[in-house]
């Protein structure tokens, strides 16, 4: 049904899957000749992962430049080497902050800022993935990059965690943003939950799961719910 389509699928990436694994699964389901994605999500993250089929892969670079929106939770009390729940504990602290201080601190990050991505990221350093070098224990510096935070908002706060929504530019590392927020507050914290809510016109409200995609393809069901976008709908 989809092997000859030139389109984008708004796939819901499940927790525990790499973006590359999702691409491989979609390729097997659709039998498309070419399959790619519109922006990597960490394995521990979930949410919107736009998947391009066939000629749509040629438009992937443009989609990667689109604004993105995330929902994430910072768990207080520990810094971890990966800045997420999968990393090793680097430092612990009993220090905490208040909801008001946290919310006020978020305003400092609105606009164009410099960010140093985590060493446990897919950025290439002299041809090697940074996370490979980090896991090998090699010493190296991560280059800073300019990103832009358009909106950031505290949604929920308790003593040991905070839930935040952020709209940002391409190249923004949420794990690094979380660490910077905690450093500004003088506390420890890491990202315990991360969901991408939006990539350009792709919204979490219209994603399709891998199981549903397989069922629709097997049953020949037409996509009419926004989970498939044709090329002219993406730009």
Image (cartoon, rainbow, N blue to C red):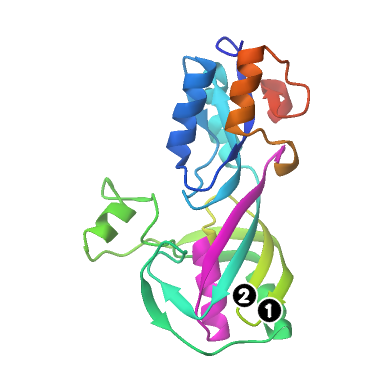
Q: Which residue is mark 2?
A: 161
**Residue under the point 60% across and 79% down:** 160
Q: Secondary structure at mark 1?
A: strand
In reply to whether residue 177 is colored magenta, the answer given is yes
Above or below residue 209? Residue 185 is below
Q: Which mark is residue 158?
A: 1
Residue 118 can be seen in this image: yes
- The residue at 47%/14% (across/down) is 33
Does 2 sit above or below residue 77?
Answer: above
Q: Residue at x 44, y 61 (%)?
A: 117
Can you say whether 99 is above or below 127 in the image? below
As drawn, is 128 to the left or to the right of 17?
left
| Quadrant the C terminus occupies | top right
Instruction: Residue 58: give x, y in percent of width and height.
Output: 53, 24
79 up-or-down from 136: above or below: below
| Residue 125 on image: x %, y % | 30, 52
- Picture quadrant where residue 222 is located: top right
- Asked if residue 110 shows in the view, the reply is no
Residue 134 part of the magenta segment = no
38 or 164, which lies in front?
Answer: 164
Residues tagged 1 and 2 counted as in contact (Cβ below 8 A): yes
Residue range (magenta):
175-203
């Amino acid at each position: 049904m989809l092997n000859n389509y030139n389109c984008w699928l708004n796939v819901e990436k499940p927790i525990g899957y790499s973006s590359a694994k999702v691409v491989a699964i979609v390729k097997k389901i659709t039998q498309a000749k070419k399959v790619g994605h519109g922006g990597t999500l960490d394995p521990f993250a979930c949410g919107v992962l736009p998947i391009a089929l066939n000629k749509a892969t040629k438009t992937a670079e443009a989609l990667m430049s689109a604004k993105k929106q995330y929902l994430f939770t910072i768990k207080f009390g520990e810094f971890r080497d990966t800045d997420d729940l999968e990393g090793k504990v680097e430092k612990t602290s009993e220090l905490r902050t208040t909801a008001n201080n946290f919310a006020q601190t978020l305003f400092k990050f609105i606009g164009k800022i410099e960010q140093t991505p985590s060493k446990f990221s897919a950025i290439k350093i002299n041809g090697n993935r940074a996370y490979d070098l980090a896991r090998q224990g090699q010493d190296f510096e991560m280059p800073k990059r300019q990103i832009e935070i358009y909106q950031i908002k505290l949604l929920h706060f308790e003593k040991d965690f905070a839930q935040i929504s952020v709209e940002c530019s391409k190249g923004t590392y949420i794990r690094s943003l979380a660490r910077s927020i905690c450093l500004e507050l003088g506390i420890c914290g890491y990202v315990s939950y991360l969901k991408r809510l939006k990539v350009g016109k792709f919204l979490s409200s219209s994603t399709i799961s891998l199981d549903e995609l397989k069922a629709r393809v097997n049953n020949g069901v037409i996509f009419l719910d926004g989970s498939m976008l044709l090329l002219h709908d993406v730009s």
